[in-house]
Image: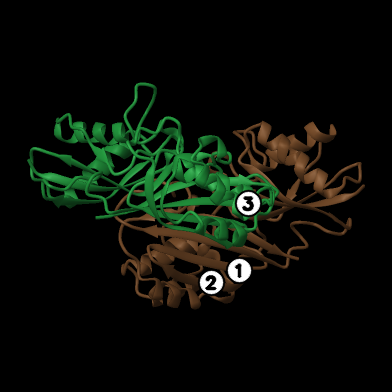
Chain colours: A brown, B green
Amino acid sequence: MPRFRLLVEYDGTSYVGWQRQDNGRSVQGAIEGAILRLTGETVSVRGAGRTDSGVHARGQVAHTDLTRDWPTETLRNALNAHLGQHGERVAILDAESVPETFDARFSALRRHYLYRIICRRSPLALEAKRAWWVVKPLDAALMHAAAQTLVGRHDFTTFRSVHCQANSPVRTLDRLDVAQDGDVIEIRATAQSFLHNQIRSLAGTLKMVGEGKWPVERVRAALDARDRKACGPVAPPEGLYFMQVDY
Amino acid sequence: MPRFRLLVEYDGTSYVGWQRQDNGRSVQGAIEGAILRLTGETVSVRGAGRTDSGVHARGQVAHTDLTRDWPTETLRNALNAHLGQHGERVAILDAESVPETFDARFSALRRHYLYRIICRRSPLALEAKRAWWVVKPLDAALMHAAAQTLVGRHDFTTFRSVHCQANSPVRTLDRLDVAQDGDVIEIRATAQSFLHNQIRSLAGTLKMVGEGKWPVERVRAALDARDRKACGPVAPPEGLYFMQVDY
């Protein structure tokens, strides 16, 4: 059967997350529903990453197998039409034919995420649910310095959810950069794969440094503790964007 | 009575517009409601511009008179708390004490607006209701060239709503720039004041040039016609942002 790779954007606000669940609408379910209405086929769409409820995507990647060898532009446009008719906040940015050996999850070489913080006194009106609103100013340079002590191959037990199902807590963090532009702070993270809640755990911990509540060195000490209790507060989902997957 | 100037951000999606109306929630009404709950006073808040339903603001300015001489930070924070409790998508970015001679509408020297277009094949998920989605690519350089033929003092009858209540159709357009960054096209407009629907009329007309349906010269000919029927289609409200007022 022909296999297709889909590039997916979504507003995660009103979804239980990427993965199909019994307790509400999922992004995966929205796409599978659109495929069912288009093709009559009940398929399983596999994503490169299982984003949590409230987490957004500009470049999630998924694959699925269909009976017919659809022209890719037709497939993209028809799926978008079906998604739009159901009021889904999901858009298929691109569809491509790929070999059967391609797997959105297991073929991924690098995943890129962005975590956005907006620091200002007033609540967010236009950016509500699109960033983490932090009232006090943060020192992005200190946050960046602390972040650099985490780059590389480490046991990230401190920075993963207790519900994380990965066999190993060891991951290689290729990039963890913190940059400021006006009242926006952007944290960019790259790795082949991440643990459950890893980026939100890192972002919440770096915020402690930015506020001056933690010295820079405490972040590395927290990593070395290999203890979930050493982690700072986990940052909320609305600041997180799944940006890109490299294959 | 002490007069206060408020700097206001809002997501215009779920409002009937800035101005209080009988048929739904307005931004003005949201702020007046917050003031009533905070102070017990029924006031009228006057804005620098009456934005339509769906139009956003990053820098609307309003003024109001209160009995008490509130510390401005307290006023801002308390109004934001009341707006948040009512689920309003409105934030007070700043509050200042101003002399009684200050009038948000009549003291304004220049108003700055942004109109955002996103050109791409797929519908907008994350930017839905935040920009005008245009499927076909537009030539921003041609749009900019056409825009320059409108800068200056002119009779803008062609580019104002038939419902416009201004006495004169003559306005001085200080700036109308079109710039492209990736799939985003930004139109920036500055004038002391604008006519009703003027920027959306200009944006919709410039899009005709960008698509190649109108030659550049037709835009100036449309202006010179001083005839509403010579205008291109009016662009939708969700692309428009009221950015700043200079005093």
Image quarter where the N terminus of chain B lies is: top left
Q: Which amino acid does label 2 sit on?
A: Leu
The residue labelled by disc 2 is A176
Camera-side residue: A238 or A44?
A238
Q: Determine the residue positioned at 74% across, 57% down.
A: A105
Q: Which chain carries label 2?
A: A
- Estimate the x, y position of residue A219 in percent, counting from the top left: 43, 72
Mark 3–mark 2 distance (CA, rounded to whole Å): 44 Å
Q: In which quadrant of the rendered view does residue B34 lie?
A: top left
Left-right relation of A29 to A143: right
Same subunit: marks 1 and 2 = yes
Residue sitting nearer the eye, A55 or B237: B237
Crowd tier of the residue under label 2, counting other residues whose Cα lies within 10 Å: few below 14, some 14–19, many 20 or above: many
**Residue under the image location 65 percent in, 42 percent down:** A27
The amino acid pointed to by label 1 is: Thr
Task: Please give the label number shown on residue B209.
Answer: 3
Residue A198 against residue B14 in the figure, above or below: below
Q: State the image quarter where residue B63 is shown.
A: top left
Q: Name the residue under label 1.
A: A190
Q: Mark 3 lies on which chain?
A: B
| Sequence-first disc among 1 and 2 | 2
Image coordinates of residue A205 in percent, x first then y, are 43, 64
- Mark 3 to mark 1 CA distance (whole Å): 41 Å
Q: Which chain carries label 1?
A: A
Q: Is residue A78 visible?
A: yes
